[in-house]
Amino acid sequence: MSIERIRQLFEKYDTDSSSPAEEKELFTLLDNYREDEVLDLLVEEIRRTRAEAVEGERWEQVLQQVLAGNRQERRPVINIKRWLAAAAVIALLGGGAFYLLQRNDRPGPAVAITGNGDIAPGTNKAVLTLADGSTITLDSTNRVLPQQGNASIASSGNGQLAYTAQGNPAQTVYNTLATPRGGQYQLTLADGSRVWLNAASSIRFPASFTGNIREVEMTGEVYFEIKQLADMPFRVAIPGGVKLDVLGTDFNINAYHDEAGMKATLLSGAVKVTHNEATITLKPGQQALLNKAQTLKVINGVDTDAITAWKNGLFNFPNASLQEVMRQLERWYDITIVYEGTVPNRQFNGEIERNLQLSQVLNILRKSDVNFRVEGKTLIVTP
């Protein structure tokens, strides 16, 4: 395989000047070789040529676009996942940013942005509401927070909040941790269970657990790793009358009100899901879906890695519609989505890192023949 030929074809593809025949040639060349072989060639090429350095963010954008996927005439699908590994090329070079299969005289950004410039991704931030109703804004600062009942609270500088209980509380006091749009946070409950909150999510919980059941309430999307206590099961209450009863288990709940329905996905252990009179018990790899018609059913063989990708710093789009993709971007970048004209009928399949600037993500997605422009905090989608 000629790395120079791939360079030439990619330059045309990235600037939308390639012909259908050239695009087909590019995808054929890359699909005929294992990813590690391609990476070896790319690394060797960079070591040999030491291509010109560019601004720090540019290399990520280029690497993510290399194999954005084969565009089809109808319902194009972008396959991004296998080329996320190409970011390892930079680490192999020992630092610095380099052009990879790209010239220095490329045209300007493909996505028009007006206002205050590009939009940064979400960060670790949340608001903690204490038992007395007072609120504390949490960010990247280490701090010791006020005692709640018999529990001490510590906020670390890496987006984590931890409760530690000492003795038996005189009374049960409740706190609420909530992330805004553009925020995420982690929580360790007093029993040692761990919780991850996605953007625009919340959890209400006791500062320390008493009695014979541990119960919390949540909204949005939350991932749980529950510590097993045989004499004190764990319960999650979700808006709409849904309850999950567990012992020791790992699971993800997506209960955003603007999604197609509530989804509870089990990774390990066992979970009993109850809604009104309906009850189902999940096994690992299964998902409970409560649709808008209030029907509870089990989905088998779900891709748990895709569902929990957000916790690991990735967007995952498993044959996702354009609207599904936009809802994720709306929450993570704290923007408003507006559709101009007919909503394009597109599918997306793959992963994109959540630490990219909004324009970088949009330049990847536009390979599916969708156009965008950004006006302030509004993302306008056009056919």
Image: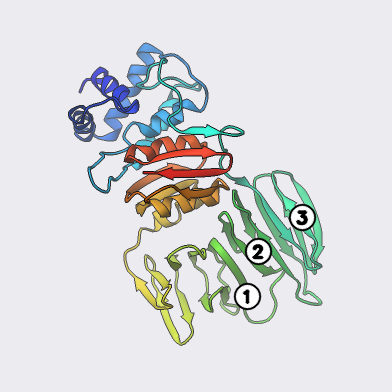
Pick whichever, 276 or 158, lies toward us: 276
The mark found on residue 189 in the picture is: 2
Q: Residue at x 52, y 74 (%)?
A: 247
x then y, percent, for residue 208: 71, 70
Residue at mark 3 to residue at mark 1: CA–CA distance? 24 Å
Q: CA distance from mark 2 to mark 1?
A: 10 Å
For the residue marked with disc 2, what is the amino acid? Leu
Residue assigned mark 3: 136
* Quarter of the C terminus within the rendering: top left
| Residue 255 drawn at (x, y percent) | 51, 66
Q: Are marks 3 and 1 in contact (CB under 8 Å)?
A: no
Image x and y of residue 26, in percent: 23, 29
Q: Would you identify the image quadrant in which residue 32 lies?
A: top left
Mark 3 or mark 1: name the one nearer the start of the chain: 3
Q: Earlier in the sequence, mark 2 or mark 1?
A: 2
Whether the residues at callouts 2 and 1 have beta carbons within 8 Å, the answer is yes
Residue drawn at 42 percent across, 35 percent down = 363
Q: Which element type, helix, strand or loop, lies under badge 1?
A: strand
Give the spatial CA distance, label 2 vs label 3.
Answer: 17 Å
Is 257 on the left or on the right of 202, as rendered?
A: left
Do the CB atoms of the residues marked 2 and 3 lie less than 8 Å apart? no
**How far across and down, in percent of the image, does residue 251 sit?**
48, 64
The residue pinned by badge 1 equals 214
* Mark in the foreground, 3 or 1: 3
Is 104 placed left or right of 167 in the picture?
A: left
SS under mark 2 = loop
Q: Where, quadrant-wise, is the N terminus in this rendering?
A: top left
Amino acid type, callout 3: Ile
Can you name the residue that lies furthest to the bottom here? 277
326 over 120 or under it: above or below: below
Secondary structure of the residue carrying tag 3 is: strand
Which of these two is toward me, 189 or 380?
Answer: 380
